[in-house]
Amino acid sequence: MAETRRVLIVDDSKTVCSVIEKILHSCGFDEIEAVQNGQAALDRLHATHFDIIICDWEMSPMSGIDVLNKVRQQDNIRNTYFILMSAKRDMEWILAAKKAGADGLITKPFTPDTLKQKISQLGAVHAVA
């Protein structure tokens, strides 16, 4: 079971948010919030502490990489673990995400085990179930 950690899911698809939330619950996380756009994510990050952000890249009008850039520019939230998701698979995407400061990358579609592994690799939590 994971330590108690707060997770923010950011994806314009409520279905994707729901799937990720179920995976996180199965890992022992119980403090999970989901929002459907980048601005809502930034608003939540300023209102509440989160340990991990799991964010889709391809959103509008603010992309996940835009959210990541804004998070990394702000002292009070810059060290929050950030996992970026995308259906993209090319090296350009990987390099851009790493350059922006993503702590982890997940290619959609992904399995529950892939998400669990990425979270465990962060070092933010003990190994998840």
Image: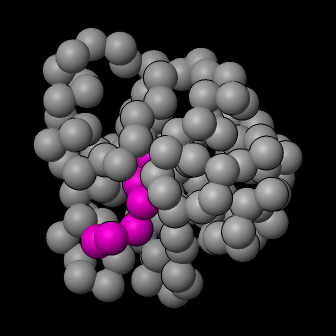
Percent x, y of residue 105: 40, 34
Q: Position of residue 111 (x, y in %)?
A: 68, 23
Answer with the quarter of the image where residue 97 lies. top left
Q: Residue at x 18, y 34 (%)?
A: 96
- Residue 32 lies left or right of residue 115; in this view the side is right
Location of residue 115 by image quarter:
top right
Pick whichever, 15 or 128, lies toward us. Answer: 128
Of 69 and 129, nearer the camera is: 129
Q: Is residue 62 visible?
A: no
Residue nearest the viewer, comparing 104 with 72 = 104
Q: Does residue 72 belong to the magenta stretch?
A: no
Q: Which residues are magenta?
A: 78-83
Residue 36: x %, y % from top left: 57, 52
Residue name at image x 31 percent, y 47 percent: 102
Give the vertical position of 36 relative to 107 (above or below).
Answer: below
- Name the image quarter holding the C terminus: top right
Of all residues shown, which one is farthest toward the top? Answer: 90
Residue 95 shows in the view = yes
Image coordinates of residue 108 in percent, x first then y, are 54, 22
Q: Is residue 121 left or right of residue 127?
A: left
Q: Which quarter of the image is occupied by the N terminus? A: bottom right
**Residue located 22% across and 57% down the image:** 69
Q: Residue furthest front?
A: 126
Q: Give the image quarter of residue 86.
A: top left
